[in-house]
Structures are given as structure tokens and as C-alpha cells.
Amino acid sequence: MAPKIITVTPAGRKPYLEILAHYLLQNRASITEHHFWINTNTVEDIEYIESLTRQYPDFFKSRRRPVYDETRLCDSIWQYFQDYAENDTIYIRLDDDICYIAPDAIPNLAAFRAAQREPFLILGNIVNNAICSYYQQQRGLLPLAWGQVGNTCMDAVGWESKRFAERLHEKFLADIRQGAVARWKMPPQVLDDYRRFSINVICWRGPDMQHIPELTIPNLYVQRLMHPLNGKEIYDEEGALTEYLPAKLGRPNVICGDALFGHFAFYPQRRYLETMTVLLDDYRGLIGDKANAKDEMQYRLKRRLKPLNAFASRHAWKYLGRQVRRVLAR
């Protein structure tokens, strides 16, 4: 009997969830249920999640756990994993800003997970994820002229650079429209050095989360872990899942190159991508969410006007002032 698949999302932000929900519903043939781990105090976001659970009560579910620090909501996500450890179940955790899921991504990821039992986590092949970008660039897919991506989770180019992320998304969107996304796939990559990995898409088997006492720690930021190999202090969900537990258990994580996902933004990139580009509208357009001529007109107008937001940035005016002073000083 095939294992059931349950997907989960720490949630969330409505503009992103509107896109993610579309792809989740597209994958109902593969996914048994999707659970939202409530990780927001924003009323509009919560109301949207509740509307989904009312409209699709047999598919969308919401889950809550105690919040120990209202200023650091993300520190509470760690508690949920202890509840997702059933036998014969494959779990997939998706960030709320996953903006594209290839038609075969969920089945491929689950099948790879079922076949590969040794890795602690199976990771998606994620567009806009620094380590995935490193491998994509090594394969010649991403030009070095955009910046050389290092093989680290929070790389200055692959994680931090907003212009790199913009170019990456533009290239990926062009390939989606041309039916050429297969070029982004790659062979599996074993992370045998237990390096940190941005957990935009991760997959585990229920038994993988059984008998792990660390999962009962209420708040890793307060009660920190020590890496068993290098002594590094681990203080968050991502570090515990991708560095600490794989090293402790001797089970390196693996990227499934056939499971392709798009991730919108890391926080150093987010403001620029949201306010200066129409990339999120482009991803929304892929799911047919420009329903009529009026929406199309608004989209075209937004594409022309969004770059003008630069003039609202104090950093832009500071930069302009420096340039003027340099010219006058000559």
C-alpha cells in the first residue's frame, strides 16, 4: 500500500498563499491533506486560511500550537514536527511563498522519498535557493556574469542579492512559458557535509521524526542545541533540521533534482521583488489569475509604474546625493 502524502505550510501571507493554494489543489490526486501551521497574527491572513478550510474541509486543515514569543513567531514552528510522525506517511513542508510547483514535482519528490530511506530529509530542487542555485550555476544554467554563487545557505549572491533573484526569476518564468522547465532538473545531490540548507521545500517519512527528544523543546532560540561534529550553536528550526539532526543521526540530506519548485524571496530580496518588480504578478498569471481585460490593463500599468517606487526610497536619494557631490567635487 502506497504511503499517504500530507503537505504542510507554516502560514502565512495571503498574497503568496493564493498562489500556493492553486498548486496544492492541482495536486489533490497525490496529496491526502494539506495542513496550515498558523504562524501569523495578521487578521486578513488568518481569515483567508479559514476560508480555505471552510471551502475545502476534507483537504485544507489548520493547526495551532502555543506561541512563546510574539516577537519571534518563527521560533514556534519547531514544535509542530513532533505531531507529524505517523507510520506509512510522507510529509512535505512548503514555504508559503512557493510560487511555482512543476506538474510532476510532488509525485517525484514523494516517490524519491519512498525509495531513498537513508537521507534524513529529501530537499526539493528549488529555484531561488542559494545551494540549488550553486548547482544550477555549476551546470551552466545561470551565468557567472550575474554573480558567482557560493555553496552556502546564506550566500551573498544566491541568498542576499535582489538583482540576482530578479534575473533568476525572469529566466525561470521565460522557460516555464516556453515549456522548457526540464532544463532546470538535475541529478540528485548529496549534502554529505551536513551543511545548512534553506528549508523552502523539505520531505520526510513519518518514522524519521519518531524517537527524537529534541522535538519536544518548546523554543530552540532559548534552549539551544550544540552541533555534534563542530560544536556550532544551533538556535532555529532550519539549523536543527538540516545541520544538527542529520549530523547526529549520520544521515546526510539529499536534493531531489527531479522535483522542481519556485521560491519567491528571502527577506533581503523581498522588498525589492515586491515593490520594484511585477514578478509575483507574473507567477500569478501562470495560474490564470488575470481574468479579464481590466486585470490585464492593471498588470501592464503596474509593470510600467513599479520601477518608479525607487524614488520613494531614502537609500536611492542618498545614493543620488553621493553621486552629485562627487561630480561637484571634481
Image: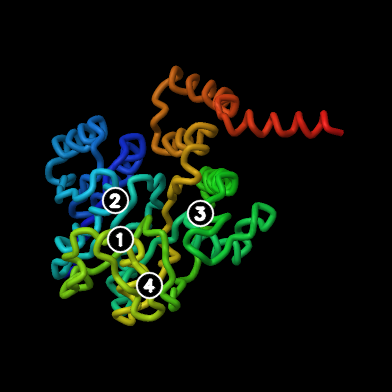
Query: Under tag 4, what secondary structure?
Result: strand
Whether residues under marks 1 and 2 lie with C-beta atoms below 8 angstroms apart, the answer is: yes
Point 67% across, 58% down: residue = 144
Q: CA distance from mark 3 to mark 2?
A: 19 Å
Front: mark 3 or 4: 3
Q: Which residue was labeled with disc 4?
A: 253
Position in image of residue 19 (x %, y %): 35, 39
Label 1 to label 4: alpha-carbon separation: 15 Å
Residue at the disc numbered 2 = 74
Q: Quick check: marks 3 and 4 in contact, CB under 8 Å? A: no
Q: Give the side of residue 315 with respect to residue 204, left or right.
A: right
Q: Tell me the CA gap for discs 1 and 2.
A: 8 Å
Q: Quadrant of residue 251?
A: bottom left
| Left or right side of 261 for 23 | left
**Tag 1–tag 4 contact (CB < 8 Å):** no
Q: Amino acid at mark 3?
A: Trp
Return the disc, 1 or 2, that comes first in the chain's sequence: 2
Q: Amino acid at mark 4?
A: Asn
Q: Residue at x 59, y 60 (%)?
A: 149
What is the total number of numbered labels drawn onto the structure image? 4
Q: Residues within 10 Å of mark 3 (few under 14, many from 20)?
A: many
Q: Secondary structure at mark 1?
A: helix
Location of mark 1 (residue): 237
Q: Quadrant of the N terminus?
A: bottom left
Element under label 2? helix
